[in-house]
């Protein structure tokens, strides 16, 4: 099957309106590959950083952004399971998802439950894997514990809140005052991040919290660590506060990583981790197995109605620039999703 894909290209450190729309004939499928028609792709913080040249290990320009996607398998290569054809699948891609069609390894595809719409499922791919692994593989939360989620109205944050509540965990979530109602609706106690966050959290959890999930980094990471109760765990998974800093894009992450290592070396009965969704990729089989298990568990909760997709807005692929602009505005709850243009 010969397919010409429409792709959104990031040509360099440009403004959103300078994204390019191109067309490219996809190569023939090799063994173990699948041709997927993309039905939904997300606009995440990663793309916002890539636009600035600030994502830790982004490829050289130009490239097609798109960290994750959901779509339908149209064709499979030799040695691939023909039963995949016609099925809706999800994939974690890091780049390449902002396209009408993609070629992927079948081993990287995770089946989506039939009763989940493509745009709904999309909100749970990178966000769901990230939230599930941080909660259950890193912090190992238990029912009855209390956690703090920074950016509780965001894509990862809103998923973290819901997964934690499903596990019987009490959640305190930071957000702007205008998003307090949305955070409350998710099941968390809202805290205004523009105020004195440590004081507000201490008022709700005088003995400290059992885990903190922090994507902000910067100086505030010290407060996150100090808010931990004895035996508590800090999981850092970004450095959003430094996104506009000039200079080497790796330095903020390396400084954060060094600080976490230092805290772990001190006898303070608290733990600190840096979460990277791609850790363990060198052991590709184990990485794929874990990813499939975790995303399947998240999809199951969504299909049961335990998790609710937080879709901030939908944009056709041709309006990727507007979608990226909205995502960067920090005014939305949930995830901005790209969907196919109407035929």
Image: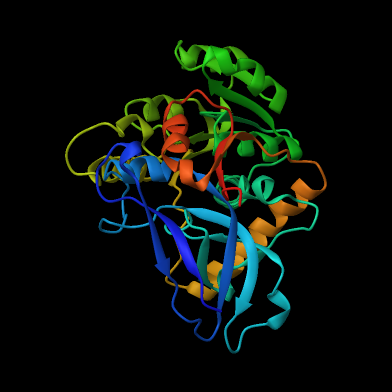
The image quadrant of residue 49 is top left
Q: Does residue 256 lie above or below 287 as drawn?
A: above
Q: Report the front residue among 211 and 195.
A: 195
Q: Does residue 109 lie above or below 179 as drawn?
A: below
**Residue placed at 69% from the left, 82% from the top?**
82
Q: Where is residue 339 in the image (x, y as percent from the top left)?
A: 58, 47
- Horizontally, residue 233 falls left or right of residue 251, namely right
Q: Which residue lies furthest to the bottom in this view?
A: 79
Q: Report the front residue among 54 and 197.
A: 54
Q: How is the image coloured?
A: rainbow
Q: Which residue lies furthest to the right in this view?
A: 304
Q: How many marks?
A: 0
- Horizontally, residue 13 falls left or right of residue 181, namely left
Q: Quadrant of the N terminus?
A: bottom right
Q: Position of residue 147 (x, y in %)?
A: 60, 31
Q: Which residue lies furthest to the front in this view?
A: 343
Q: Position of residue 259 (x, y in %)?
A: 31, 39
**Residue placed at 57% from the left, 61% from the top?**
91
Q: Position of residue 297 (x, y in %)?
A: 71, 55
- Horizontally, residue 155 falls left or right of residue 143, namely left
Q: Does residue 334 lie above or below 100 as drawn?
A: above
Inspect this view and state whether residue 187 appears. Answer: no
- Horizontally, residue 249 falls left or right of residue 86, namely left
Inspect this view and state whether residue 173 appears. Answer: yes
**Residue placed at 58% from the left, 45% from the top?**
131
**Residue placed at 46% from the left, 26% from the top?**
330
């Amino acid at each position: 099957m010969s397919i010409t894909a429409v792709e959104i290209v990031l040509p360099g450190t440009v403004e959103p309106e300078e994204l390019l729309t191109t067309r490219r004939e996809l190569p023939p499928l090799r063994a173990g590959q699948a041709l997927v028609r993309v039905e939904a792709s997300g606009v995440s913080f990663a793309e916002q950083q890539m636009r600035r040249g600030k994502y830790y290990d982004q490829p050289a320009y130009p490239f097609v952004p798109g960290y994750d996607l959901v779509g339908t398998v149209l064709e499979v290569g030799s040695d691939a399971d023909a039963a995949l054809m016609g099925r809706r699948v999800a994939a974690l891609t890091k780049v390449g998802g902002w396209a009408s069609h993609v070629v992927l390894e079948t081993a990287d595809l995770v089946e989506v439950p039939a009763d989940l719409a493509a745009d709904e499922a999309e909100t749970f791919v990178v966000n769901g894997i990230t939230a599930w692994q941080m909660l259950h593989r890193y912090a190992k939360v238990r029912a009855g514990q209390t956690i703090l989620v920074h950016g509780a109205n965001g894509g990862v944050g809103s998923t973290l809140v819901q997964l934690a509540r499903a596990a019987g965990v009490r959640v305190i979530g930071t957000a702007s005052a205008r998003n307090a109602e949305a955070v409350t609706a998710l099941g968390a106690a809202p805290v205004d991040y523009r105020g004195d966050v440590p004081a507000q959290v201490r008022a709700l959890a005088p003995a400290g919290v059992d885990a903190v999930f922090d994507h902000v980094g910067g100086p505030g990471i010290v407060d996150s660590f100090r808010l931990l109760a004895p035996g508590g765990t800090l999981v850092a998974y970004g450095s959003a506060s430094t996104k506009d800093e000039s200079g080497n894009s790796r330095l903020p992450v390396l400084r954060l990583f060094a600080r976490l290592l230092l805290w772990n070396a001190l006898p303070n009965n608290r733990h600190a981790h840096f979460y990277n969704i791609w850790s363990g990729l060198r052991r590709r089989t184990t990485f794929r197995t874990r990813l499939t298990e975790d995303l399947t568990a998240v999809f199951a909760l969504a299909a049961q109605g335990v998790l609710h997709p937080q879709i901030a807005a939908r944009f056709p692929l041709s309006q990727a620039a507007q979608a990226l602009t909205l995502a960067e505005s920090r005014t939305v709850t949930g995830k901005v999703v790209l969907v196919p243009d109407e035929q």
